[in-house]
Image: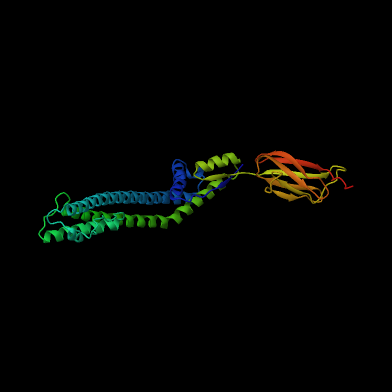
């Protein structure tokens, strides 16, 4: 079993790699600390700075989310209000109410069919609101009474509120972009501190047994991934008749009917060192000119070393 360092890539992972050692060094006197005095100072200074910048980004993300939600809420209200207003106008035209005829539809930029516009985009909803306000204004100028169930004032107020929320949303978005830029500008400094801390930890633990070193390093914020070790095989191929080594025998670790797996060719001594991660039940397949192919069943485990001798029989001579 082996472990390989996995340097953190995300901002949150970098923060964790900074805060773990920062929280541990406080009660430790410098002479007993695995982190050098210089790097201890860098950690103490830069970890809180990075945390504050990351928290600032989170705050700006929350504000943007809030502003987007507020904008969407008003947009939905405006869409419903305008839709109801258009339905009301179309209904009055169809019913032949006083002051409402086919020409009235043009005031609201509605087709003669009375079909309502599709309000499936922000732009379409805003345009529809303006068209409704313009239609009511034109009809009022012609002596008509303003609608009361869906008033021009209501639509105008919602549209005004929507535009204000849109401005707040864009401002929040710009503030978030700026906060992210500040964080990313500081990121190389944070990365460098983490690398220095990890170098100190590796030096401090270099004489420890692997398991203890891994545990200690993880507690101090290092991140690892498990890297599977190989199974190692020392393969010897012999002539079954006389025990002589067979040179040039082709070897493969895998299933007899497959093609993949580790491959090798025996030396003049009939031997070959091989390694494989094909753990579990598998085979060592041996082939050599003039000999019957052999498939030896084996079971491989990580870190295991096997000595395998395969004796190959010659092919029968043709009559």
Q: Nearer the viewer, residue 110 or 32?
A: 110
Image location (x, y in percent) of residue 122: 29, 56
Quadrant location of residue 104? bottom left
Q: What kind of colouring is applied to the model shown?
A: rainbow
- Left or right: residue 77 versus residue 52 is left
- Note whether 143 is above or below 49 in the view shown: below
- Note whether 113 is above or below 302 in the view shown: below
Image location (x, y in percent) of residue 247: 81, 50
- Residue at the left extreme of this rendering: 143
- Left or right: residue 233 versus residue 36 is right
- Left or right: residue 104 versus residue 268 is left
- Note whether 187 is above or below 208 in the view shown: below
User: How many labels were placed on the picture?
Assistant: 0
Q: Residue at (24%, 54%) from the top-left corner?
A: 162
Image location (x, y in percent) of residue 40: 46, 49
Quadrant location of the N terminus? top right
Quadrant location of residue 114? bottom left
Image location (x, y in percent) of residue 264: 73, 50
Q: Residue at (54%, 50%) from the top-left corner?
A: 199
């Amino acid at each position: 079993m082996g472990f390989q360092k996995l340097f953190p890539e995300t901002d949150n992972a970098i923060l964790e790699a900074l805060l773990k050692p920062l929280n541990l060094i406080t009660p430790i006197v410098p002479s007993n600390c695995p982190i050098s005095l210089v790097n201890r100072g860098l950690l103490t200074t830069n970890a809180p700075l990075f945390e504050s910048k990351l928290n600032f980004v989170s705050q700006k993300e929350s504000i943007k989310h809030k502003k987007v939600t507020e904008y969407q809420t008003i947009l939905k209200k405006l869409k419903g209000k305008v839709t109801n207003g258009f339905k009301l106008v179309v209904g009055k035209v169809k019913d032949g109410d006083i002051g409402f005829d086919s020409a009235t539809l043009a005031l609201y930029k509605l087709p003669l069919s009375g079909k309502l516009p599709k309000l499936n985009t922000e732009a379409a909803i805003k345009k529809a609101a303006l068209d409704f306000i313009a239609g009511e204004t034109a009809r009022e100028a012609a002596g008509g009474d303003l609608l009361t169930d869906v008033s021009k004032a209501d639509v105008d107020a919602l549209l005004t509120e929507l535009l204000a929320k849109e401005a707040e949303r864009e401002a929040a978005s710009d503030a978030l972009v700026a906060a992210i830029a500040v964080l990313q500008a500081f990121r190389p400094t944070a990365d460098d501190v983490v690398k220095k801390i990890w170098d100190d930890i590796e030096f401090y633990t270099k004489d420890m047994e692997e398991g203890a070193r891994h545990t200690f390093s993880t507690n101090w914020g290092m991140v690892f991934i498990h890297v599977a070790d190989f199974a190692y095989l020392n393969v010897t191929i012999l002539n079954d008749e006389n025990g002589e080594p067979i040179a040039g025998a082709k070897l493969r670790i895998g299933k007899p009917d497959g093609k993949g797996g580790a491959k090798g060719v025996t030396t003049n001594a009939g031997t070959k060192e091989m390694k494989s991660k094909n753990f579990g039940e598998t085979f060592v397949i041996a082939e050599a000119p003039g000999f019957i192919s052999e498939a030896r069943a084996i079971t491989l485990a990580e870190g295991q070393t096997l000595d395998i001798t395969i004796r190959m029989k010659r092919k029968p001579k043709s009559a």
